[in-house]
Image (tube, helix red, strand yellow):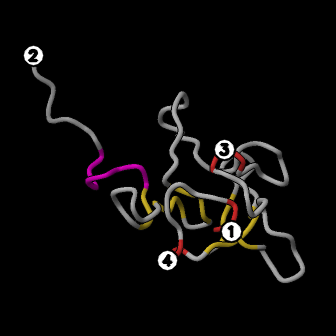
């Protein structure tokens, strides 16, 4: 699976979704193609997963709550992938129950 930086949206590496666990570490990610370097140092902790292109944290940003971080998902070209062991596995659009979040009708 291709990994994309959440800040600059550049494809920066690859990973095997079956081996991802929280907390994410640099050892879980590989090079984008043969002949490329892995995107992160092998010994990098979650806090050290910095994009090799823009230098900002490549994973963990929560666009719905900018004051918080998500340590359980990565951005791929297909959308966010939630890491196993984080409560839910697979792609997500940020909705946990598939509903739009809209409430019923307006009450007067």
Distance from disc 4 to disc 1, alpha carbons, whole Å, reads: 12 Å
Residue denoted by label 4: 18
Label 2: which residue? 108
Which comes before the other along the chain, label 2 or label 1?
1
Give x and y (percent) for residue 51.
77, 52
Mark number displayed over residue 47: 3
Report if residue 11 lies within the magenta region.
no
> Horizontally, is 19 left or right of 45 in the view?
left
Give me the C-alpha separation between circle 2 and circle 4: 50 Å
At x 83%, y 46%, the residue is 54
Q: Nearer the viewer, residue 97 or 90?
A: 90
> How far from the left and from the top, in percent, is residue 39?
78, 63
Q: Quadrant of the C terminus?
A: top left
Q: Please tell me whether mark 2 or mark 3 is closer to you in this view.
A: 3
Label 1 element class: strand
Along the line of sight, the residue nearer the viewer: 20 or 3: 20
Q: Which residue is mark 1?
A: 29
Lower sequence index among marks 3 and 4: 4
The magenta segment = 93-100
| Distance from Cα at disc 3 to Cα at disc 4 | 22 Å
Q: Earlier in the sequence, mark 2 or mark 4?
A: 4
């Amino acid at each position: 699976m291709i990994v994309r930086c959440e800040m600059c949206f550049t494809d920066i590496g690859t990973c095997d979704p079956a081996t991802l666990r929280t907390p994410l570490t640099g050892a879980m990610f590989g090079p984008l193609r043969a002949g490329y370097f892995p995107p992160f140092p092998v010994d990098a902790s979650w806090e050290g997963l910095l994009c090799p292109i823009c230098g900002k944290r490549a994973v963990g940003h929560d666009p719905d709550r900018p004051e918080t971080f998500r340590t359980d998902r990565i951005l791929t070209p297909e959308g966010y992938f939630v890491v196993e062991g984080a409560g839910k596995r697979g792609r997500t659009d940020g909705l946990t129950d598939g509903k739009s979040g809209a409430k019923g009708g307006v009450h007067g």
